[in-house]
Image (cartoon, rainbow, N blue to C red):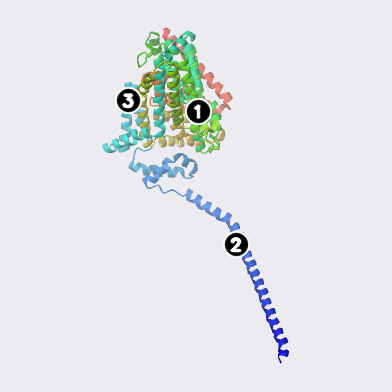
Amino acid sequence: MKKHLAPLAAAFAAMIALNAGAQADVAAAAEEAVAATATAVEETVEAVAEAAAPVAEAAAEAVEEAAEAAPKKLDDAATAQEYIDAYADNVQEDPNFKENIEAALATVRQERPAYGTFWAVFPPLLAIVLALVTKEVYSSLFLGILAGGLIWSKFSFEQTVVHVFSDGYIASVADSYNVGILVFLVLLGALVSMMNKTGASAAFGRWAAAHIKSRVGAQVCTVVLGMLIFVDDYFNCLTVGSVMKPVTDAKKVSRAKLAYLIDATAAPICIIAPVSSWAAAVAGFAKGAGAESGFSLFINAIPWNFYAILTIVTLFFVAIAGFDFGGMRRNEEKALAGDLGALGADEFKNANPKGRVYDLVVPVAFLVAACVIGMIYSGGFFDADNKDAYRNFVEAFSNSDASVGLVYGSAVTIVFAVAYFLCRRVISFKDCMDSLPEGFKAMVPAILILCSAWTLKAMTDSLGAKVFISQIINGPAAGLQDFLPAIIFLIAIVLAFSTGTSWGTFGILIPIVLAASPAPESTIICVSACMAGAVCGDHCSPISDTTIMASAGADCNHVEHVNTQLPYAMLVAAVSFVSYLVAPFVGGWRVALPIAIVLMLATLFVLRAVLGKRKAA
């Protein structure tokens, strides 16, 4: 029986094994089918997602555009002020800018009724008028600041005190950039004091008296030196003043005339020099406002900068022709009689006989080199992590911080000068150290005026001066497209004259000009007109830091410098205005610039002839 059942059991076992194998095959097939289905589903989902992505992006963009196009909620003061503070960006990016800016201004004016109105520029205008009338700058500046505080606080005593001193003086002096400029002034004053102690300045004066034979030569040398030191206007003012004072004194050129020559070769030269702190600033403002290349825009605008170029033409004409008018003529006549108009006593009397000309030339040359290196260092020239600026002079200069770079350069120069003078044995270590407080004391008047000027600017900013000027450009001036360069030139003059800052004027107006220019070909002329007007207003303003330092560099009464310089600056400004009226209609700068130069020379010749006849009569 077992023999019969054994084959049957074997067969049965084989069937079970066969069935198990079949089930395994089925399971494997099922798993493959499930995996294939999952893969197909995943691919389908990815395909649907890819197809839906553009639709989703378009929908998101549409929602974002709708949100931007919708009127913004600007009914609370903080949001409204934030929108106004971003004026330059919003004027280009916000399609409902006009409606939104009006809503923001209405909200802010509920608390500050004078914000963005004429009263925003009243304080600086008051200070300027008082300074010109009273010939006393400190009280005039403070009264302008006080007027700004009273208007801002709606004549609240407590808020006026807080705004003037906490938001004004303290905040301005605490600003890192401003502190850097003050430190640079003190260090440069110490260097000048040190060179005077060595007798180097007196030695240079004696050398100049022997080699520069005339008053014309002294003035031309001052202009040329000012043109050569083009990296920064602050540096220009103080360096040219300290070097050329003994030369112009020897040839009986008044300190007022020296201050004009210094001032007129500071900002007007820097604004047309591609390698300068001003070029970097303008390029930065233009780039930040949406220009493809801010530096390229600056380069293309140079031949259209009529005010700067015509100022140089006027300088050479005045120096070579000996043509003076207004208050400058009276100062020059006094200088010929022996009264140079210097503030201090003759610093070259009883001069150190050990001093030589190279005791002045070597430190000044070192200072120039050290300041340039300091500026490119601050811009990342030696920073390997900065891919754009590393070993790229132009890019590093564009990114430089002038206040930091000048402090680096002047500090290193002080150390070098002490070591140099000790090695030369012309003065003692004690004399070198005594020069530090003496240099500080020499710069105190300039520092006081600078701090007050910065505070006055803070008052105008808090009252919305930039909004007031910007509204004029985007309002009444916007419809006069053919005359836009001339209008922008005038507005820039008023803004820079009122605030005392050309850089602040660039920052306010360049973004607006780029947005308001009707065509690409007119953009360059309009930007150049903005730069020219800013320099002109800065050149004329008694609260301008450059004007203040030109007075300090020449050791000239500040109000006297402003009064004597103003007629020359206004004459150049008038010819520049006419040139900007003509410029849009004559084609390129190769035609417009010669016309402007001929017009300037013709005006000078006619004025000299008319004034000469009056004097003869």
Which amino acid type corresponds to the residue marked 3 in the rendered image? Answer: Tyr
Q: Residue at x 53, y 51 (%)?
A: 61
Mark 3 and mark 2 lie on one chain; the one further toward the N terminus is: 2
Mark 1 and mark 3 lie on one chain; the one further toward the N terminus is: 3
Residue 180 image point, x, y percent: 41, 30
Helix, strand or loop status at disc 1: helix
Which amino acid type corresponds to the residue marked 1 in the rendered image? Answer: Ile
Which amino acid type corresponds to the residue marked 2 in the rendered image? Answer: Val
Residue 257 image point, x, y percent: 42, 16
Foreground mark, 1 or 3?
A: 1
Foreground mark, 1 or 2?
A: 1
Mark 1 and mark 2 lie on one chain; the one further toward the N terminus is: 2
As drawn, the label of residue 138 is 3
- Quadrant assignment for the C terminus: top left
Outermost left residue? 157
Helix, strand or loop status at disc 3: helix
Q: Is residue 51 above or below residue 176?
A: below
Which residue in the structure is indicated by mark 2?
45
- Circle 2 Cα neighbour tier, 10 Å, few/some/many (<14 / 14–19 / ≥20): few
Q: Is residue 550 above or below residue 399?
A: above
Q: Is residue 8 left or right of residue 212?
A: right
Q: Residue at x 63, y 67 (%)?
A: 35
- Quadrant assignment for the N terminus: bottom right
Q: CA distance from mark 3 to mark 2?
A: 76 Å
Q: CA distance from mark 1 to mark 3?
A: 36 Å
Outermost bottom residue? 1
As drawn, the label of residue 373 is 1
Q: Residue at x 46, y 50 (%)?
A: 70
Q: Are marks 1 and 3 in contact (CB under 8 Å)?
A: no
